[in-house]
Amino acid sequence: MKQLKETAQKIKSMEIRGAGRIARAAAAELRDYADRLKTDDLNEFNEKMQFAAELLVSTRPTAVSLPNAVRAVMRYKGESANEARVNILRLADEFITGSENAVLRIGEIGARRVRDGYTIMTHCNSAAAISIMATAYAQGKEIRVIATESRPRWQGHLTIQHLDKIGIKTFLIVDSAVRYFMKEVDLVIMGADAVTVNGSVINKIGSSQLALAAHEARRNVIIAAETYKFSPKTLLGELVEIEERDSSEVISREKLDEFSNISVRNPAFDVTPREYIDLICTEVGAIPPEMAYIIIKDYLGWGIEEMNSNMRI
Ligand code: RUB
């Protein structure tokens, strides 16, 4: 239980962050938790697994990868606690390996859209988006990247560290400079925390203004997103919840206490409408955003019928 709570806390505090990493961490925690559960009673085992699943899902409401990963593991079956445990171990490992391979495949598919000499703008820190840039660069394409700081948590600093290691020439800019630099950009590549059934993309706050600026300047926007970032629940009209984080990420508590009339709004994500997105690059292919339902139905296995027959998580 201690380790389960620690993992949940690491996801909540963003020590573990980024939709793909969160998903893999949750799958790994369910696997290890099942392994640590010593009970032979199947009912007790199931109840404890359900508790763990719900705790992990509650940590970050926007990243759909999290419930999708948990659901992939919680599909386990077993006539006994031990059979269930063995099944969970297999499903979790399959999810983790599949997720790692998906990032590599997205790199290969997406890199076909990157030409030699391109300047790419990116936002926040997305392993899937970086995979495209890294693959294009490894293919010998001379690219340069413009990366935003991504306030208030500065995920852009992780991105520049990564790109620097690969050897890609990168400019770090403040978030408010995206429109200023758009004229120098050939292609925008960003990641996703969630993709809705109508093809809208939820990603780090500021993504939608970057996409809007790209649309205005007629630059293409590619979203790099594994299929498990698509949200089945949006099929039933549910909206993806946008997480609002603590004010202390934006201004210190002491500073804020100096004011009487000021409070902070700190949404972690925003929604980019599909009109501003040219392509969503998944591991099963590069699709127009309008095809999101196909991914949810054919690749995640959640059609309308399955959705209506009670999804617990
Ligand atoms: C991270 C973020 C990333 C997506 C995709 O937000 O918005 O763009 O999660 O990342 P946070 P990846 O830092 O708040 O988790 O491609 O690595 O899954």
Image: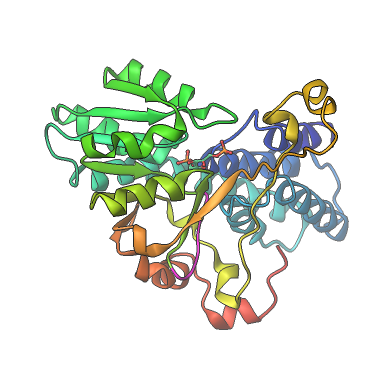
- Please indicate whether residue 271 sits to the left or right of residue 166 in the image: right
In this view, the residue in front, 125 or 171, is 171
The percent coordinates of residue 254 (x first, y second) are 82, 21
- Please indicate whether residue 112 sits to the left or right of residue 278 in the image: left
Quarter-wise, where is residue 23 in the image?
A: top right
Figure quadrant of the N terminus:
top right
Q: Could you tell me which residue is drawn at 29 percent across and 29 percent down?
A: 145
Figure quadrant of the C terminus:
bottom right
Q: Is residue 135 above or below residue 160?
A: below
The percent coordinates of residue 258 (x first, y second) are 83, 24
Quarter-wise, where is residue 181 in the image?
A: top left
- Please indicate whether residue 42 sits to the left or right of residue 172 in the image: right
Q: Is residue 209 above or below residue 176?
A: below
Give the colour scheme of this rendering.
rainbow
In this view, the residue in front, 80 or 312, is 312
Query: What secondary structure do most residues of the magenta stretch adopt?
Result: loop
The magenta stretch spans which residues? 193-198
The percent coordinates of residue 219 (x first, y second) are 24, 49
- Please indicate whether residue 89 sits to the left or right of residue 95 in the image: right
The percent coordinates of residue 161 (x first, y second) are 42, 18
Q: Could you tell me which residue is drawn at 44 percent across and 57 percent down?
A: 227
* Residue 133 covered by magenta stretch: no
Please count the marks in the image: 0
In this view, the residue in front, 83 or 136, is 136
In this view, the residue in front, 45 or 294, is 294
